[in-house]
Amino acid sequence: MPLSHLMELQTFRPPSFAGTMMFLVRNQVQQWKNHCRFSVNTMLSGHRFYKHLLSGRKCVSKNTKTSVSCSYSTEQNDTSPSIKQLSHARVIYAVAAALGHNKEAHPESSARVPAIVKALEKMELTPKFCGSDILELQNFNLASVDDIASVHAKAYVSGLEKAMDQASEQGLILIEGSGPTYATSTTFHESLVAAGAGLALVDSVVAASKNQLDPPTAFALIRPPGHHAIPKGPMGFCVFGNVAIAARHAQRVHGLKRVFIIDFDVHHGNGTNDAFLDDPDIFFLSTHQDGSYPGTGKFDEIGIGAGEGATLNLPLPGGSGDTAMRTVFDEVIVPCAQRFKPDIILVSAGYDGHVLDPLASLQFTTGTYYMLASNIKQLAKDLCGGRCVFFLEGGYNLDSLSYSVADSFRAFLGEPSLAAEFDDPAILYEEPSTRVKQAIQRVKHIHSL
């Protein structure tokens, strides 16, 4: 299928922003490499996937020397953990590393999830070291086409699947016009795996919440990321909207009508934003760096029609850091969530706001992410029976990404932060406190907080 046919399925093209992002990627690659001191020896074992692996057979992937191992199935069998396992777990996670979805020297690379897994092992935050406190979901079903179509146009989904033939022939194709989103021959399948991991974690958390007051907090360590993917196509490194698909799943399958989505990625989650613009039952709250890719997420983007007021966008000035985010959490996120009264909280957890990340200029630290993880877990416990699932989005410095995710796990466990062992206060500079205060006051006025 000619790539032009896939592009015809997209009626939305942001060439100026996408072009800007590609320019940024090219000019930041060397800086990114300098930051990425976390050595991960990722060894692809070739094409272990059949053409699309949609034949109903179970697939097992063991493709790296960092012991990333996940099993997933297209069969609709019961792959859920037992109630006993869930009752003992305090953290549950799933790994979908998408090792075949990779482009050389691209920030959104196949090294990202293995780096996290290696850090979890190094810091003894896996079932091997923590016993029943941490549970890894190793068996889960792929998301179905119907799951994906709950958010994305069926024409886009089928077009992407057909484009895999071209990707097989050429090795790698661009699927966002001139934008930075690429695909390999395994992208369609591995994107179904990623979305499926998120759905399985939602299922597990909901099941646990029926039998205990403090269910495990879940984390989908998955890629490709999803929050930029718009209903009609891919965008900004993202293929399918993982958190948006999970939100619809929570509503449709579990009857959890009111879903609260927090997106603290440094870039605006425009795809999630667009998916629920007119939906009053899904509250989307995004904090992001003002002026960053893709240029959306302005204060006055608050939803439309019945969904007006159920979207909150807070663009923060460059240089905002830990103090700013703590204030945002207390003065914006908490009162919004309390007023909305969610049935579940989903989190687009992007770690590219870290001061070491090359693609933006906020000053979050590993300690900032520990704070967010701890506070969001408590918020879920206070408001919705502890039902909370995190989804990996951005984060392109492998050091700061992996250590920050590991410290998030420590927060879920209620263990002290080890951020002081990684963060270097000497590289921080004064936050733009006046501009941060103005931004917070503006969004509080718009949303009557």
Image: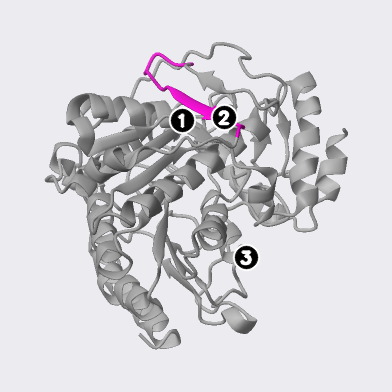
Residue 304, how many percent across, how many down?
A: 62, 80
Q: Amino acid at mark 3?
A: Asp
Side of 293 where 435 appears, left or right? left
Numbered label attached to residue 73 = 2
Residue 384, how many percent across, how many down?
A: 33, 66
Residue at the left extreme of this rendering: 416
- Look at 43% across and 39% down and name the residue there: 80
Q: Amino acid at mark 1?
A: Asn
The part of the chain drawn in magenta is 63-75
Q: Quadrant of the N terminus?
A: top right
Which residue was labeled with disc 3?
274
Numbered label attached to residue 24 = none
Q: Are marks 2 and 1 in contact (CB under 8 Å)?
A: yes
Which residue was labeled with disc 1?
139
Q: Earlier in the sequence, mark 1 or mark 3?
A: 1
**The stretch drawn in magenta includes residue 95:** no
- Look at 49% across and 40% down and name the residue there: 197
Q: Earlier in the sequence, mark 2 or mark 1?
A: 2
Side of 74 where 210 appears, left or right? left
Q: Earlier in the sequence, mark 2 or mark 3?
A: 2
Q: Main secondary structure of the magenta part?
A: loop
